[in-house]
Image (cartoon, helix red, strand yellow):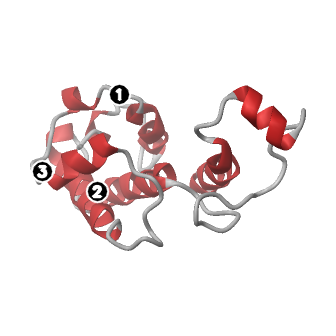
Amino acid sequence: MLLGVAIGDALGAPVEFLSLESILAKYGPDGVTDLEPWDSHPAGSYTDDTQMTIATALGTLAAVRAGAFGSSDEAAPYVWRAYLDWYETQNDPANRRGPGTTCMSALAGGVMGTALKLMDAQLALRSAQASIGQSGPPRHPSPWLAA
């Protein structure tokens, strides 16, 4: 699953903020068909979306290993810690892959938020990890909404 996220993200990174018209003008009617460099990153580089997806997965797995998977209150600190670890990597320009101002500001504040504060486009990017560590019937994804 994570490999698919990273590959799709790397394919889309060069066109993430382009209009359809701009994409067609640059890549033709087939659009992006190969990995391309973007900004200062080489071809095949994924964005902050994949970095945060990996951080979410690492935090979720840490919660599972610690047995803190029964509620969002138990699991959220593990995901929060993983987000803070990711945040620290953003000081290195080679690791900085275009994180949003809202995300960076929230993490810089140093105060863990609640699930209700995460009702934005980032939610969809993080939802894939809901399947990691699951056994039995699906649960609500709230343990993964730490930021």
Q: Is residue 13 left or right of residue 85?
A: right
Q: Is residue 132 left or right of residue 24?
A: left
Q: Bin the neighbour count of mark 3 within 10 Å (Cα to Cα): few under 14, some 14-19, many 20 and up.
A: few
**Residue drawn at the location 40% of the way across and 36% of the way down:** 122
The secondary structure type at the circle numbered 1 is loop
In the image, residue 23 sits, relative to residue 107, either above or below, namely above
Q: Residue under label 1, please give it.
A: 120
Q: CA distance from mark 2 to mark 3?
A: 12 Å
Q: Which label number is shown at residue 109?
A: 3
Viewer-closest of 11 and 143: 11
Residue 106 x/y as whole percent = 20, 45
Q: Earlier in the sequence, mark 1 or mark 3?
A: 3
The secondary structure type at the circle numbered 2 is helix
Q: Earlier in the sequence, mark 2 or mark 1?
A: 2
Residue 18 x/y as whole percent = 64, 36
The three-letter amino acid code for the residue at tag 3 is Gly
The three-letter amino acid code for the residue at tag 2 is Tyr
Looking at the image, which residue sits at the far right?
A: 29
Residue 118 x/y as whole percent = 27, 32
Q: Are marks 1 and 3 in contact (CB under 8 Å)?
A: no
Q: Bin the neighbour count of mark 1 within 10 Å (Cα to Cα): few under 14, some 14-19, many 20 and up.
A: few
Residue 136 x/y as whole percent = 42, 37
Q: Residue under label 2, please give it.
A: 83
Nearer to us: label 2 or label 3: 3
